[in-house]
Every structure is written in C-alpha cells, then in structure tokens.
Amino acid sequence: LARDAQAALQRERRIVETAAALREATHRLELQATTDSLTGLMNRRVLYERLGIEFRRAKRYGRPLSALMVDVDLFKQVTDVHGHGFGDLVLTVVAQTLRSSVRESDLVARYGGEGFTVILPETHGADAMIAAEKLRAAVAAQECTDGITSVHVTISVGVASLPECDAEDPDALIRLADTAMYEDRKSTRLNS
C-alpha cells in the first residue's frame, strides 16, 4: 500500500512538472508570436490588433487617437558602411529609445525594416506632434555603439490623428502617418 501511495505521488509530481513545462512553452510561443525577435517590441500583427481596438474605441466614443510612423534616416548607409550586424544594433537602440520615451499606455511596434509605429491613445494631433519631436530628439541624442564603432542616427516621423484626419479605418490612419513621414523625410533632407 505504501508503494502504491509513493507511485501515485511520483505520478502526481510528473503531472505537475509537465503542466509547468507546458505553461512555460506556451508562454514562449506567445512571445514568439507577438514580439519582434530583434528589437523585443510588439510585432506588426499585434500592432494591427491593438490599433484596431483603439481605432474602434476612438471612433465610437469620439476620443482622440494618434499614430506615428517612424523611419531611421539613411539606414542603408549605416549598413553599407558598418554592416548588417551593426544595423541590427542601431535598430535595437532606436527601439529601446522609442519605448522608453513614450507613456506606458502607448504602443511601440516594429513595422518592418527600419520602420516603427507608435500608437498614442487619447492623444490629439498637436500633442502627437510634441511627442514626435520628443522622439526625434531622444533618438538623435542616443549613441549607437558596439564598443568600437559609434554613430548617431536621426529619424523621420509622420503623424496622423483622429479626429483631425478623416481616416475611415486603421489602415487609412497608418497610410496617412506613412505619407506624413515621407513628407517629413523630404523636408528634412532639403533643409540639411
């Protein structure tokens, strides 16, 4: 009888250990499915899920919502001169700088390549422009270094905000911010 109890206890321990291992594996899979592996930011899939929720809420309740499209300026030159590994370092530093420069309620996501998106709930256009300038200054001040090579990069930022713009869906809001980002890039290059 004692042997049966001991065997039952061992089975119970294995079940508990297996359940814990499954929870851990599920957590790792969820992170892989929602997180950009290079920067640690939310990925594009999560961006669109969260943006959809925020967009519908803003439209339904007449609340402000802003989207920023951010692109690292002259990124190809960085990778051409210093290599793709250093380019990855630059993207990681920019991602960390963006994340640490916004509110906890804001979402920073990797959009793709050297592009990022920042979603600012409850933020009108004028305040989003202030946030964009804050991000621009924070990134420009941040040194990207691997201990041997050191560079400072700049970003171009485009802003689109509800209710100021007439976006009919989340994709339109992103497109408007993206267009504004390209306009910002053109004006920055003309003035430098």
Image: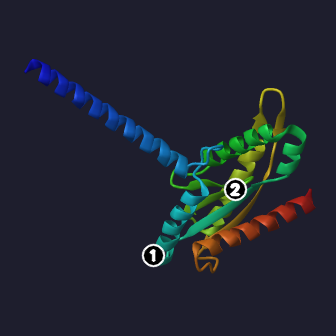
The residue under label 2 is: 112
Instruction: Name the secondary structure under disc 2.
Output: strand
Residue 165 figure quarter: bottom right
Q: Residue 1, relative to residue 164: is it above or below?
A: above
Pinpoint residue 69: horizontal percent, then vertical percent. 69, 61
Q: Considering depth in this image, is 5 or 31 the residue closer to the camera?
A: 5
User: Residue 61's mark?
Assistant: 1
Q: Considering depth in this image, is 138 or 49 the residue closer to the camera?
A: 49
Of the numbered discs 1 and 2, the one sitting upstream in the chain is 1
Q: Residues within 10 Å of mark 1 (few under 14, many from 20)?
A: few
Q: Are marks 1 and 2 in contact (CB under 8 Å)?
A: no
Pinpoint residue 93: horizontal percent, then vertical percent. 70, 41
Pinpoint residue 9: horizontal percent, then vertical percent. 19, 26
Q: Residue 32, relative to residue 169: is it above or below?
A: above
User: Residue at horizontal 81%, vertical 45%?
Assistant: 153
Q: Is residue 142 visible?
A: no
Pinpoint residue 137: horizontal percent, then vertical percent. 74, 49
